[in-house]
Image (cartoon, rainbow, N blue to C red):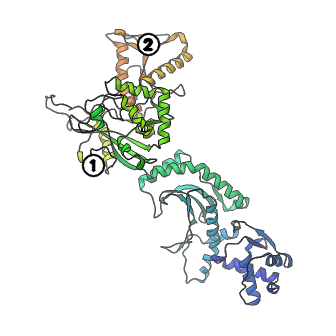
Amino acid sequence: MKLEALNRAYIEQASAIIDEQGIPKNHVWSQYYVLVNGKEYPFKHLLRTAYELATGEQLQFQSNESYRGYIENELEFEFRYYEGGYNFFTKEELEFYSSIVNTDYRTSNPAHQYYGQKLYPIIAKAKFWAEQILVEGFRLRQDGNWLNGHVARIKPYFWPRVYNGEDKDVFFNVEVNGSEKFIGYKLDGYFETTKALPDYKIKLLEEYKTLIDWEWPRISFKKLDEYNWERLISESREYVQKYLPHHNHLKKLLSKESKISRITWNTNGWIKPSGLIGKSTNDSFEKEYGFGHEEWLFDGDKVIDGYKYGFLEPIHKYRSKYEGQVFDLTLYTREAESNKNFWVASLKDVEVLLPEESERILAQYKQEGWYDEMKADLYNLNLDSGQLDIWIKEGAEQLFNVKFKAYQLNKIPAELFPVLNDNEIPSTRYILMDLPAGIQEKIEVGIKTGFSFEDSGSVEANLGTKSLRSGSKKEIELELKHNILQTKFLKYLQKKYGKSIVKRECTAYGASRIDVTRKTDTGYVFYEIKTYNSLRTSIREGIGQLLEYTLYPNANEAEGIVLVSHVAPSDEVKKYLHHLKNFIKLPFSYTHFDIEKEEIILEI
């Protein structure tokens, strides 16, 4: 037998050579490892190296029981078996990596001769590890280069990635970090590489990581003796399964585009239909029937699991193309009589529905009686409510094709903002259009512009021209939400203060009705409940009523007046409320009451 030329000394000398020179790339994989002086060496490479020392010849062989038996039984070396072909990360190879990381590599330097062979096992093991966390539909991007090519410097880490779709945004990766001395795994995105995402997507990614309390498990080199392949792979796979929904959501968010979408003209704040006035005069559905299917887009009484479901005509035209995609949409509308365009609102993360979700939403609308309410809204305007039935015969996606987070309803501006330059809108057709650079910022600045005498207003007295103020929209209060809020808030106060001293619908001057009144030891507190989408509108409408209930015509009926709403005030509105209280110097306050929790969240 060829191996009779070998003895223990040759095996030990071969192991020392491998310690010094590393392992050639094509010899790294090995299911059988030999234990020499407490360290593991790939069987075939160890045997070849030892045989060449003993005979000066190359040994050509296949690993078999006979060869392994000679090393194990005759020379008395222990074997270890690894199904995947790689032993676990070793202390020695990781310490070597840490000792040279971020240093310059020079081919002319003899000390650098074996850098590659000593790093190949780490690179191969990182790749093997990444392969173990692949899930269906994902692919592997190997990180096989141990040099930062443009500077010929030892890379600080190896990070093979697994990704879905195109390798351009987010991925899972495993990592061996020689610079910071840890191995780890995480959900991540492209930041400072040649594939770096644009700044706005990086910001979105960072915000999302904060939102989900993103974890990045890292195991220091010092603690690797607590691990083996089984434990590391098991924990890595659990992490991938936990974060897979976040990965999929991020893929949608990062692939989303910012678009302009036209919606039908409406003077009821898109809470309910407003009729024929201002509708398109071109050949279209809304001209023929007097309404568009976006009329209910901002109806906050109809929210399901935190989402508002609705319809957008530009999506409908190309629904199969857009299914499952996510967009940031800037909505505009056109008033036909004046031929003027107005910006309506900006919605983030508008997701295009799949047909099965549309069907589910329609079924719930029917169950809640909301679908019949929509038909009644049309009937009350003498419009053909049967058109809704005709549409849904072709599928529920004819009536529901998008959804967005309902909290955005409370951020919709109370007024329409005129499009100052019609060239900002590429087309007036009902199609999705790219949002020109800078437009969104211009709209936001325009909405927040303060009082100006010099740069606005008119010295002309003639108001005969139609539609000079058609940018104003009529805010509609959410009736169902008002009733629910009033009922729950009444019970809350009665539980806190006593049922006998808290009443609803007490009469004020002129047969007006106060939503809730509480009797105190020294007087009364009046509560006015408002459920507009816009808290600014609730404040505008509610304070006037409270003042009238209390002071008209020359009285002082309440010692405290409170506006109650379901909407959490933004920082800007909080400043306004504090300023308002100081300015009017009345015992006025604002209460944010959470309908779901049935408790007061904030009082100002």
**Which amino acid type is marked by label 1?**
Pro
Picture layout, residue 61 above or below residue 79: below
Residue 167: tell me if it is visible: yes
Residue 582: tell me if it is visible: no
Marker disc for residue 581 = none
Could you tell me which secondary element the residue under label 2 belongs to?
Answer: strand
Picture layout, residue 503 above or below residue 187: above
**Which amino acid type is marked by label 2?**
Glu
What is the spatial separation of the Cα atoms under label 2 and label 1, in whole angstroms?
51 Å
Percent x, y of residue 223 = 70, 59
Neighbourhood count class around disc 1 (C-alpha, 10 Å): few under 14, some 14–19, many 20 upward: few
Q: Which residue is labeled 1 in the image?
A: 426
Q: Nearer the viewer, residue 353 or 595?
A: 353
Left or right of 351: which side holds 160?
A: right
Q: Nearer the viewer, residue 27 or 518?
A: 27
Q: Which residue is labeled 2 in the image?
A: 505
Nearer to us: label 2 or label 1? 1
Could you tell me which secondary element the residue under label 1 belongs to?
Answer: loop
Residue drawn at (42%, 38%) of the image: 394
Neighbourhood count class around disc 2 (C-alpha, 10 Å): few under 14, some 14–19, many 20 upward: few
Residue drawn at (48%, 57%) of the image: 169
In the picture, which quadrant includes the C terminus? top left
Residue drawn at (42%, 55%) of the image: 199
